[in-house]
Image (tube, rainbow, N blue to C red):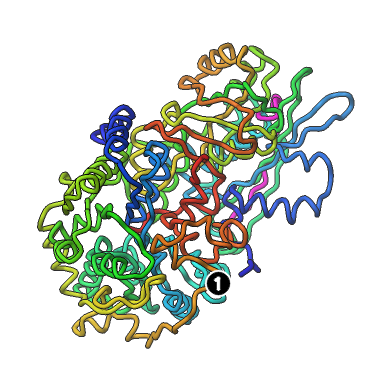
Amino acid sequence: MSNHRILLDHGSGGRQSSNLIAEMMLPAFDNPILAGMEDGAVFEMGGSRFAFSTDTYVVDPIFFPGGSIGDLAVNGTVNDIAMCGAEPQYISAGLIIEEGFAMADLRAVLADMGRAAKNAGVQVVTGDTKVVSRGAADKIFINTSGIGLIGPGIHISAANARPGDQILLSGSIADHGVTILSKRSGFSFDAPISSDSAPLNRMVAQMLRACPDVHVLRDPTRGGVGTTLNEIASSSGTGIRIYEDRIPVKQSVSGLCELLGLDPLYVANEGKLLAFVDSRHAGAVLSAMRADPYGTDAVIIGEVVADHPGRVVMETGIGGRRIVDMLSGEQLPRIC
Amino acid sequence: MLHISEYRDSRLCHSIASRIAARSSRPVRIMEVCGTHTVSIFRNGIRWLLPEGVDLISGPGCPVCVTAQGEIDAAISLARQTDTIVATFGDLIRVPGSNSSLQQEKAAGNDVRIVYSASDAVEIARQNPVKHVVFLGVGFETTAPTIAASVLAARQAGIENYSVFAMHKIVPPALEALMEMEGVEIDAFLLPGHVSVIIGMQGYSQFFENYRVPCAVAGFEPVDILRALLRLTEMLDTGDSQLENCYPRAVAEQGNPAARQIMDTVFEVCDADWRGLGWIPASGMQFRDAFADHDARKKFNVHPPDVAPPAGCACGDILTGAKTPPECPLYKTRCTPINPVGPCMVSTEGTCAAYFKYHEVQ
């Protein structure tokens, strides 16, 4: 049974999204920069190296504890550029608005975008607005693109992980995905959780100051930490070992994951990053992360190994072992 | 998490595991009947702690996996009807029918909605009075009472456009069927905690009297599972078979009579077609005549066709523990979670999906 239509799974950020990119996008746009498959494109112009990235936001609901589609749209692109080791500077904003959308909501979304841009130290310098008939979009969709300069001596890539690297995580996982799920229609939990939506560019700048030779930076958004680690293991051709008891998950988030049958390793984050650093520099980079307000809970969750290339293996909380695979399709809740 | 971390204590797990090793004098095959156990065993890496010779085999305890192919096809045909909304638990939407899936029907524009409880489906019916809302009722004794309650609620609220396509199954008759099947070798059963909360220890007494095979009801945390495995290993070592409650904080001797009463008000026992096991007498639940107006089988004249499982698919053997997923020729070749051939690869609690996602580290 083959797929003749796009399914929701194709947008999950997991294996099916990767297949779609590999089978349809890469051949259509065939070029070496895209083929790098990083969070953003990295290229040289006029003697300088730039990172350029784009992302589209369709989150539902558009307002949620800890943020809105507005700050998510700014922070997401800021982070994609930061993950290339660049300092994001200019951002574009494209809005697709459904007919009938409340002006007050639009005002609130734009105010959030403005605040997020100011907080991240970037400027929204160009934009576009389209309005479509009622039902042709759901409330508001936002595309942002951004560009930033990469400093000399910085070469970050998902393909750069090396055996012996320590794996640093900037804080608790799964906050964003669980917040959105719990707010989405059909759920009515009253748990003290909120999205982690945050700009990570200042933290990255401090990390690179502490050690310009950071090997890999990634923000584990859709697909979560599990999928991102798999992408890195696969791009670098190395094995990854992580330790379940070192991975921070807030109690309320962990409880909701249990209830919904979700594995926090595969739930989206919007204000967290993973860094791969040679063990000699891991302490300095970890200190730099912890000094940033968005990285106070940063920890080392594992290391890169020469064994089992392309595979992520986790030592479980009880001392067992299992493979952490890429997410296949959207995570579904339990039924019995 | 409060009162959970005790059941995930690494030192305690290792200590129980070494006691299991001390008591396992010969190779044994223990079947975990429940899909939630299968996932917990993989997710926590429990096999890694067990001595060689203690073989855990996964049973027919994932409700999606045991749903007959013909019933999946019937559900898909319901989704194609105009003015119908099919409401379902998420796991069912990817299950391949003979030539489509609910997920593909949804992408093609048919109204298929994922809900988290049957009462959400009743709410959809209330909000869409001109449409027929059909809830796909899969699951064991754990789920059936909540679905029965949704029918009672719909009736009380006068919501006539709500019906259930009942495909519920009952666990103990399947255990008997497994024991009677040729080529199935099971030394002991790790019995499902959630089902037992409803049916109680008494629900297994007939089965246990008939077969005297070591049985332990277990919770889903690593310590729960290991403790039950220790008791089973001890029983196998001494030859003293027992039906034991290793989940007393949740399971009572009498189970939950109130939940069973709701279930019995709406449903009656019937024969059922299990994928992999075939027809098992008195192992399913169908609507009582008094609730026929909420019975999707009657309302839409649904007669699930007798459909053969996909060629080459070993789901049947996997559900009885006769084969492990890597022994299926389609596993990881033609059958993956993205393009599943059989239901064991679809459901998050399916044995093949669990193998694929968490496969052991050799």
A92 part of magenta stretch: yes
Residue B81 is situated, as x and y percent measured from the top left of the image, at 47, 81
Q: Quadrant of residue B86?
A: bottom left
| Chain containing mark 1 | B
Q: Quadrant of residue A5?
A: bottom right
Q: Please tell me whether mark 1 sits on a helix, a strand or a loop.
A: loop
Residue B3 is situated, as x and y percent measured from the top left of the image, at 23, 35
Residue B327 is situated, as x and y percent measured from the top left of the image, at 52, 58
Q: Residue at point 24% right, 72% down?
A: B151
In this picture, residue B45 sits left or right of residue B10: right
Q: Quadrant of the N terminus of chain B?
A: top left
Q: Residue furthest right?
A: A46
Residue A163 is situated, as x and y percent measured from the top left of the image, at 64, 24
Judging by the rendered image, the residue that carries numbered circle 1 is B109
Span highlighted in magenta in the image: A83-98
**Relative to A166, is B106 above or below?**
below
Q: Residue at point 46% right, 36% down?
A: A321
In the rendered image, is residue B32 in sight? yes
**Relative to A40, is B340 above or below?**
below
- Kind of residue sitting beneath label 1: Gly
Q: Residues within 10 Å of mark 1 (few under 14, many from 20)?
A: few
